[in-house]
Image (cartoon, rainbow, N blue to C red):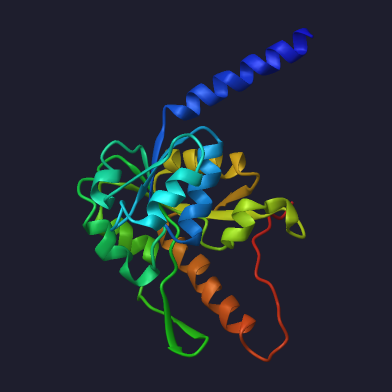
Amino acid sequence: MKIRLLLSILSLLIAATTQADTIAVIGTGNVGAALGSELAQQGYTVVYGSRNPAGLKAVDLARKTASNATAAKPAEAVVNADIVILAVPGMVVEEVVLGLGDLSGKIVIDVTNPLVMDEPMHFRYGVSTSNGEVVQAAVPDARVVKAFNTISWQSMINPEESKGPLYVPLAGNDDAAKEVVAKLVARMGLKSIDLGGIESAHWTEYGVVVSLNNQFSERQNYELTFRPID
């Protein structure tokens, strides 16, 4: 009985700690909805950033998300947020982040991939560096971390249905920010790998391009995954 009581108290303390953090999820598509819903269940306060926060899609998503999530214009959503998640189409991420206002000191998680479709179901890499580096250059005083861009939104919701542990590669110049993101990853039932500086975002993004082109080709299918080596 004492052990159960201690566990209950510990659970409440953890919840109280996470509830102090507000996360702005910019984007209400599948990825934004999956991340927002999962993080709200962990006790975070979630604000969805939408161009039309009063629209049916944004209102319905906020209603279905736990912990009284809300929706607001993107620049309004980030004002009181400790963490900002960019879950928008990859080729507009620079425009979006520049429109968010002052992000100094905030942790900005870039979930995007710079995908350009040249022909039906054939993709190419759309930037010369990486979206992670593009975002960091656009908001130099923010603490940008590349994460979650290598796994599907379905895996974010149900990681236990994968064939093995799912690892989320992290890239960023701020080690403390990466530690915070690693904790988010762990609370979602996933594992993380630190790849180093933000320039390493290129390899995770390019891997997604390679994987997508293989998926929609007639060649033998393969899977690119990140796994630690003992």
Q: Residue at x 50, y 22 (%)?
A: 16
Q: Residue furthest right?
A: 1
Using the rendered view, name the quadrant where residue 135 is placed.
bottom left
Residue 34: x and y, percent? Answer: 53, 53
Q: Residue at x 56, y 63 (%)?
A: 150
Tell me which residue sits at (64%, 48%) in the image: 190
How many marks are shown on the rendered structure?
0
Q: Is residue 228 among the parts visible in the rendering?
A: yes
In this view, the residue in front, 225 or 159, is: 159
Residue 27 visible, this angle: no
Q: Position of 185 compared to 219: left or right?
A: left
| Apparent side of residue 106 relative to residue 149 in the rendered image (left or right) | left
Does residue 230 appear left or right of residue 58 in this picture? right
Name the residue furthest top: 2
Judged left or right of residue 192, residue 170 is left
Image quadrant where residue 223 sits: bottom right
Residue 25: x %, y % from top left:
40, 49
Q: Is residue 183 above or below residue 193?
A: above
Image spot of residue 216 (x, y percent): 61, 85
Residue 88's place in the image compared with 45, above or below, is below
Quarter of the image where the N terminus is located? top right
In the foreground, 216 or 72: 72
Query: Quadrant of residue 175 in the image?
Result: top left
- Image x and y of residue 206, in percent: 50, 73
